[in-house]
Image (cartoon, helix red, strand yellow):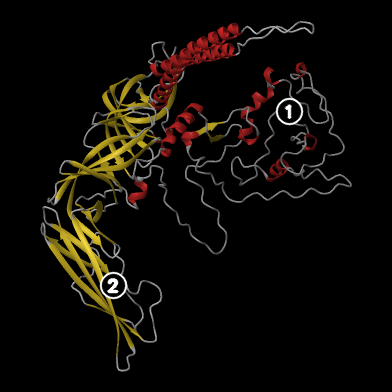
Amino acid sequence: MTAEPAQRWESTLDSVVVYAQGAVCRRVARGSVSPDGRVRVTGLPRSLDPGSLRARVLGASGVRVTEARVQVEAEPLGTDTPDGLRREVERLSDGHAAAQGRRDRQLNLIKEVRALHPVPPPRRRDDPHRRTPADAWLELADFVDERLAALHDRLLELEEALRIADHELSVAVDRLARASTDAPSAHVETTLCAVLALDGTGDAEVELEYGVPGAVWVPAYRLAYRQGDDSGRMVLRASVAQRTGEDWTGVRIALATADLRRRTDLPRLRSIRIGRSQAAPASAGWREPPAGLADLFSGYDTAGPGPAQGAAPAAAGTAAAPMDAVADFASAPVPPPPPAPRPAPQGYGGPPDSVPVLESADGAPPDAYGGAMPVPAQPAGSRPGARPRAAAKSFAGAPAATAPAAPGQAAPPPSPAPVAGPPQPSGAELDYAALVLCGPDEQGDRRGRLFPDSPFDPVAAEYRRRAEAVAALPLPGQAVRPRESAGSFDHRFDATARTDIPSDGTWHTVTVGEIPIGLRTEYLCVPSLEQTVYATLVLSNRTDQALLAGPVEVTVDDGFLLTAALPTLAPGGVRRVGLGPAEGIRVTRRTNLHESTSGLRNNTTVLDHRVHVELANRLSRAVTVEVRERVPVTSDPDVRIEERADWTAPEEGTDPDRHAPGTRIWRLDLPAGATAALDGGYEIRIPTGKALVGGARRS
């Protein structure tokens, strides 16, 4: 009787959450649960992380998932499998080779015709001088010229055909390299499926969740506003690239700034104890190997090696026994042991002639063909399966207690004392789902014990390598990685509509949604550095999510203006974005310095600075202009600075920019076609014994 195959449910990719690097996909499958409850859900990509598979039943159908694991399936591809791009590349490659061959043959023909030249017959010593047939020479030259002209015309045609074939081949190769990796690239298709064990009967809808590498995203924005309005339309877009091995068709996209591979284990602070040493507590769920584990493969060892392995090597210092004598070896008389004991080895890996001979209870040596080592009796009070100290010493290379050292030989070094306390298994040894029972062909103490399995799948490794190459894609202009701009907080942005993103490893633009944002237009100038007025947008984030740094396309009055760099805007934050010089507003700055002395004995130097700024608005609308100046700052108590102006110092927390100490601001509303003049200044009072060192004193 053969077991019935498990039911196969087709799955559909429903949603994807793209993280800073990698993605979490969710597939949905529907069907009727069979009595045995075994279901195979197909459609999983080859780059899937097997340890990330999760499954759950949607709705209250009375069915629950009791087991979920990943299984690899392989099947040959049919002849009608769509592989047009690869066949097109092969066809164009053949055509390119043919065109190159025709061009090379034409070059060889031109070389042969160019080599045609008249050769006079050899002249003997007694022959008189002969006249040269000039007409024949000229006819040959005319023939060569006509022939070369025709051949060169044909060569131009062949070179143009070769250039076109080379261009078509390069385009096809580029299309094949950029094609989706959802289609298989070999004659045997390997796919992944999720094998589920369901408890219950009836119709059910199952959701699978798994992680895949090879997906990245960066934010981008589009800002549209009209001059004079205090609000605009900010659209969040994202550039997404993925090479996960499956096309995302009609899926719900969400973008997250979190790191998918971040650590989730919590730190554990252990106690510091002073006093008697205590044994470390055993890990939960850990059990030592059972007693008598060496007898598990005694029958296998007694049967001897298989034919493919050949005859087993004989013991050191003895000849190999014939195969037909193996059966009578147990009943044959045992020769007495040699009188001189062998020298003890210095540890693991010693030469064959230094291996000690272990004797059983009746003095007989162990089986020559790998028979089971006799297990000594367990002392009272010992742990089950624990090896006695005498056996441990002989196994580690020390001689038995009854084997004295030979005369003239140095005593072997003592073996290290066994570590006290229970064993300390690692995290991999406690992952019971990944443990594999080692068979009889394993060497040493691995036989019959559970060890973590680490199979190497070259196909999956190649898919993951190609997928992770997406992280090295060059970023779009002014784009910033989300982990760099998000800071210590994580955010998630859900797209409002479903979208399609092929698995081709190139950037695709996805519209996420509209963001309410407040803005106002201000003009900024720093005439002490540059007598130019700049237009700026003061943006305020009115949402509870941060706006990450990235490029923003600014559209003013339905006309594209420029692409600027948007800084990270925290919830409720205000930042300024520059739009470039405003040619319609002019600014002029003049300064005047008057130096004098004051005091009873003229012991104070007074530096009187005067600043005059003129603004002219040539626009057809009123504008708000912010003029920035600076005054000196000092930490010397003997130096005093007195200001004489109506400017103000910027308030911390309310201004969208960070200002240096000593910054002063004029802010005024300038009507259309109006002009304004701003006067300010400050005095610097310095003791006569001191002077300004460095800097522009008279600026």
Q: Badge 2: few (under 14), some or many (20 or more) residues near its Cα, within 10 Å? A: some
Q: Is residue 513 left or right of residue 118?
A: left
**Front position in the image: 158 or 198:** 158
Q: Is residue 480 left or right of residue 104?
A: left
Q: Against 431, is 89 above or below? A: above
Q: Against 325, is 119 above or below? A: above
Residue type pointed to by label 1: Asp
* Residue 324 visible in rendering: yes
* Residue 76 visible in rendering: no
The quarter holding residue 92 reads top left
Q: Against 272, is 188 above or below? A: above
Helix, strand or loop status at disc 2: loop
**Front position in the image: 552 or 531:** 531
Q: Against 230, is 250 above or below? A: above
Coordinates of residue 196 in the picture (x, y in percent):
37, 27
- Residue at the extreme bottom: 600
Which corner quadrant holds the C terminus? bottom left
Q: Badge 1: few (under 14), some or many (20 or more) residues near its Cα, within 10 Å? A: few
Helix, strand or loop status at disc 1: loop
Real-space Cα distance between discs 1 and 2?
Answer: 98 Å
Residue type pointed to by label 2: Val
Q: Which mark is residue 631?
A: 2
Residue at the spot of label 1: 367
Of the two numbered discs 1 and 2 in the rendering, the one whose residue sits closer to the viewer: 2
Query: Image point 31% across, 66% down: which residue?
Result: 660
Coordinates of residue 47 in the picture (x, y in percent):
42, 30
Coordinates of residue 232 in the picture (x, y in percent):
16, 47
The quarter holding residue 181 reads top left
